[in-house]
Amino acid sequence: MTKKALICGVSGQDGAYLAKLLLEKGYTVCGTSRDAQMSSFGNLVRLGIRDQIKLESMASNDFRSVLQVLMKIEPDEIYNLAGQSSVGLSFELPVETLDSIATGTLNLLEAIRFTGAPIKFYNAGSSECFGDIGDRAADEMTPFRPRSPYAVAKSAAFWEVANYREAYGIFACSGILFNHESPLRPQRFVTQKIVAAACQIAQGSSQQLHLGNLSIVRDWGWAPEYVEAMYLMLQQAEPDDYAIATGESYSLEAFVAEVFKCVGLDWRDRVITDSSLLRPTDLAFSRGNPAKAKAKLGWQANYKMPDIVRMMVEDRMNY
């Protein structure tokens, strides 16, 4: 029997790479978007898989909409990657952020419980939930201290998953993913903003690059590798939560320097620190400990920040 996967948020970076991975593994892949008739699904087009995916309209914050799609598709696995995905934007759209993430996740879990179908559920957690952790690596037992509306929403969704797993025996997992990048990142994410600007400057643009706090430290991974971890979580005998990270961290300044070095430029000539880009609260340091994922899933990150920068720059210059 061919497995059927439903990817909520299939048009995003992770959704597109996950869809490609599951197609390669022989799955029938269905994806949702708020309006499947109007969405461009540009990432799916870019990966050459748009026509291989059955697309449905679904509003995850509308229980009836969620239930209808589940009963129509009858998936074996659901990957919940939908919801407002920008930490910065969550300060401007806190209600939309909480509604799309926390209510959306709850509706999916409740629909699984309501139908009684043996569906395996993956939920996209976030390292943002940990908040400030000092200079130590966070793992699955590190307490959550969220410092943004986005992190608050992701924390609520994480505990919803744990509750439905324990109360109703649903096979539900959360992947607590640290930052992961790729050429499919939209430009409102700082990594893609930096890559795009550096490449344009290298091609003759006279622009300056405005950035906020360059001293923040992040654990950056490669998105196509991280979706493999999502898949592996749902192939285990028992459901569990996993921190997914490289275990190595770099400052944003180091990321910027690496990008400009890739295009043969000195970043200090073109980067301006702009206080208007600072968030009300931000995390100074972020690093994950992926030991459990390696031990139980056999997963580990092969690409670290310098590799990711090189691949993103090469893609941008050739695109």
Image (cartoon, helix red, strand yellow):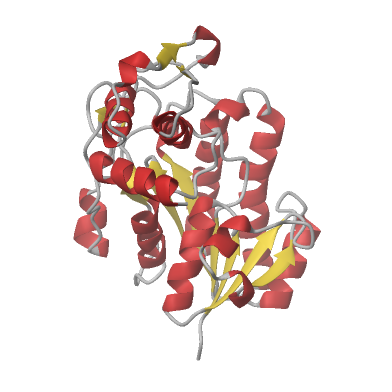
Tell which of 191 and 99 is nearer to you.
Answer: 191
Give the x, y percent position of residue 242: 34, 51
| Above or below 298: residue 88 | above
Q: Nearer the viewer, residue 208 or 103?
A: 208
Residue beneath the point at 55% across and 42% down: 186
User: Which residue is rendered at x = 72% and y = 74% of the image?
Assistant: 71
Answer with left or right where residue 101 lies relative to residue 177.
Answer: right
Observer able to see residue 301: yes
Q: Residue at x 25, y 52 (%)?
A: 301
State the residue lying farthest toward the bottom: 1
Counting every numbered tag in the picture gives 0
The residue lying toward the viewer, choosing from 23 and 270, is: 270
**Looking at this rendering, what residue extends furthest in the front direction?**
204
**Residue 41 position within the rendered picture, expressed as x and y whole percent measured from the top left:** 65, 59
Q: Position of residue 179 (x, y in %)?
A: 39, 40
Asked if residue 171 can be seen in this view, the reply is no
Counting from the top left corner in percent of width and height, residue 131 is at 40, 26
| Vertical relation: 64 (above or below) 201 | below
Quadrant of res 43: bottom right
Question: Which residue is at a point 66% across and 23% down the rendered structure image?
Answer: 92
